[in-house]
Image: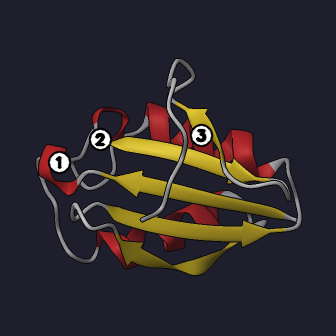
């Protein structure tokens, strides 16, 4: 089982549209040929949006990361505003950015 969490600092987006919480998961479902599904969203105490995806195919993770890092979404460069964690069964490990030294925490 693969669980992906995408934490987005909305203050760093040029177009922080509220529908992002629905449109981004739908887009990622499409580009992975439904290897992942929307598993909800939440907001941190700081106001960051956290989008959750779940799937059975670990091959979806590189597809998701490539899409999030190579293509603007709704006029937003997500690379400047996101932290991506993947959980393969032992808790979330940060997979983007690669040089992130902290821990992925959903508060």
Residues marked 1 and 2 touching at CB (< 8 Å): yes
Task: Label 2: state its secondary structure.
Answer: loop
Badge 1 density bin: few <14, some 14–19, many ≥20, Cα 10 Å: some
Relative image position of residue 102 (x, y in whole percent): 50, 32
- Residue found 85% across the figure and 51% down from its top: 58
**Vertical relation: 7 (above or below) 98:** below
- Residue found 56% across the figure and 69% down from its top: 52
Which numbered disc, 1 or 2, marks the residue that appears first in the sequence?
A: 1
In the image, is 25 to the left or to the right of 81? right
Badge 3 density bin: few <14, some 14–19, many ≥20, Cα 10 Å: some
Position of the C terminus, as image quadrant, is: bottom left
Relative image position of residue 8 (x, y in whole percent): 34, 53
Which numbered disc, 3 or 2, marks the residue that appears first in the sequence?
A: 3
- Res. 42 image quadrant: bottom left
- Residue found 26% across the figure and 51% down from its top: 9
Which numbered disc, 1 or 3, marks the residue that appears first in the sequence?
A: 1
Residue located beneath label 1 in the image: 13
- Res. 77 image quadrant: top left
Residue located beneath label 2 in the image: 81
Badge 2 density bin: few <14, some 14–19, many ≥20, Cα 10 Å: some
Q: Foreground mark, 3 or 2?
A: 2
Residue located beneath label 3 in the image: 65
Relative image position of residue 36 (x, y in whole percent): 72, 68
Question: Visible in this render: residue 34?
Answer: no
**Vertical relation: 37 (above or below) 78:** below
């Amino acid at each position: 089982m693969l669980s992906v969490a995408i934490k987005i600092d909305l203050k760093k987006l040029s177009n922080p549209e509220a529908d992002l919480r629905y449109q981004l998961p739908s887009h990622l479902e499409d580009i992975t040929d439904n290897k992942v599904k929307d598993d909800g969203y939440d907001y941190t105490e700081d106001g960051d949006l956290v989008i959750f995806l779940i799937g059975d195919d670990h091959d979806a993770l590189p597809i998701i990361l490539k899409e999030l890092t190579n293509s603007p979404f709704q006029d937003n460069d997500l690379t400047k505003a996101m932290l991506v964690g993947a959980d393969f069964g032992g808790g979330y490990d940060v997979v983007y950015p690669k040089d992130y030294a902290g821990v992925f925490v959903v508060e």
